[in-house]
Amino acid sequence: MAAKIAGAGGGKYDVELNNEINVTPFVDVMLVLLIIFMVAAPLASVNVKVNLPPANTKPVTKPPQIIYVSIKENGDLYVGDNEVDLTELPDALKLAAGPSHVGLRIFIRGDENMEYGKFLDVMNTMQDNGFYSVALVGEDRSGVGGGGHK
């Protein structure tokens, strides 16, 4: 007696049963990702209006996590879109940065007409609380590079 292992009759191991690619799951995943990015992109921008001084350097690439500290002309202070007091600044930065805030670069957006003393108060408060890596944001008025932050 012999058992038939494979033959011309076909069966569940026949490779020729499905020779077309089903792209429906791929399209579904792409549409979900598109919707996620369309919703998340506006949340990543800063809505605080600040009159920035001009920048003379070339723009650099964006880091993976960006935290903006904005100082308006009247001295109002913001972390992202949230208004904070100078005494609340370290806690707001730690909350925005999460547990890995050591070495994280903080971007300062200061109005060109603000008092220099306000800027120094913010810088000293940040340094006293372990935020040493700071970048200053300026407006690109050269017309090269597609504009700057406002």
Image (cartoon, grey):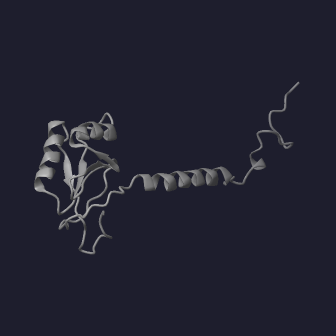
Above or below: residue 137 compared with residue 84: below
Above or below: residue 148 compared with residue 84: below
Looking at the rendered image, the quarter that the C terminus falls into is: bottom left
Residue farthest toward the front in the current orientation of the protein: 74
Percent position of residue 129, x then y: 18, 36
Looking at the rendered image, the quarter that the N terminus falls into is: top right
Q: Which corner quadrant of the image does residue 52 belong to?
A: bottom left
Q: Residue at x 40, y 52 (%)?
A: 44
Q: Is residue 102 visible?
A: no
Residue farthest toward the bottom in the current orientation of the protein: 143
Percent position of residue 54, x then y: 20, 68
Residue farthest toward the right in the current orientation of the protein: 1
Q: Residue at x 28, y 41 (%)?
A: 93
Q: Pick whichever, 35 or 88, lies toward us.
A: 88
Q: Pick whichever, 144 or 42, lies toward us.
A: 42
Above or below: residue 83 compared with residue 73: above
